[in-house]
Image (cartoon, helix red, strand yellow):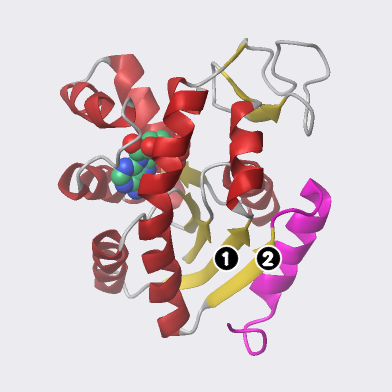
Amino acid sequence: MTVVVLLGAPGAGKGTQADLLADRMGIPHVATGDLFRAAVRDGSPMGIEARRYMERGQLVPDDITIRMLLDRLAQRDAAGGVILDGFPRNRAQAEALDAALAERGATVDHAVSIEVPSDALVERLSGRWVCREAGHPYHETAHPPRVPGRCDLDGSALIQRDDDKAETIRARLAIQLGSLRDVVNYYRATGILRQVDGLASIDDVAEAIDAALADDAVGAV
Ligand code: AMP
């Protein structure tokens, strides 16, 4: 099984790149944010609990998050590996992931950090729209849909996530950048971290990610 962790601040382009990479590698894109949003839509007890944190731009507690992610990894389509997007978000989650993978003789194979300066993140997040059906991401100026208000991939309506509204964005960034730094440092210490420039075009970032995955011996940072 091949496990790739994509790291980056909210708005760095993780979701877009994880979708593209999942297609190229033929393994699922697993985004804990999407799993939580699905649970909120379903109105499950976990969704109701998670929603209290998501609305405030805070992280959902680790016990809930880790359990949900491990359940997802146990599903059959994840047997060949996964692209993780939005997990791990702190050191405890990174350690729980390592322990769960070790039980199956697996490990995190690659951690790729998509680097974008914070002023560019605010501008990107406030123009972001996602489709109602599957969360496919678009941007008003950088990546508009072919038909305004409709997803190119599944035709569903585009909506703005509650936590992409301006007042929540700065809170999310302030809270999340610190723990992201811890996770980046965690993978830097294990020697598997690669960094790519997230300000480049979508195609160029995808190419840089492929190069980072191919390049295990050199380029560690
Ligand atoms: P995202 O779509 O990755 O920006 O996630 C949206 C929200 O879901 C976050 O602001 C958190 O409230 C929650 N969330 C997603 N992933 C995690 C995680 N790994 N740990 C804790 N909370 C998470």
Quick check: 112 above or below 73?
below
The amino acid pointed to by label 1 is Val
- In the rendered image, residue 98, in percent from the top left (x then y), is placed at 30, 70
The amino acid pointed to by label 2 is Val
Quick check: 109 above or below 93?
below
Residue 196 disc label: 2
- In the rendered image, residue 23, in percent from the top left (x then y), is placed at 67, 47
- In the rendered image, residue 204, in percent from the top left (x then y), is placed at 82, 56
Q: Is mark 1 within 8 Å of ligand 1?
A: no
Q: Secondary structure at mark 2?
A: strand
Q: Nearer the viewer, mark 2 or mark 1?
A: 2
The mark that comes first in sequence, 2 or 1, is 1
Determine whether label 2 and label 1 are within 8 Å by CB. Answer: yes
Rendered-image quadrant of the C terminus: bottom right
- Image point (28%, 73%), residue name: 102
97 on left or right of 10: left
- Mark 2 closeness class: few <14, some 14–19, many ≥20 residues within 10 Å: many
Specify start and end residues of the magenta stretch as a single range. Answer: 198-221
- Foreground: 101 or 169? 169
> Is residue 75 at least partly visible in the picture?
no
- Image point (35%, 34%), residue name: 57
> Is residue 85 at least partly visible in the picture?
yes
- Image point (70%, 53%), residue name: 24
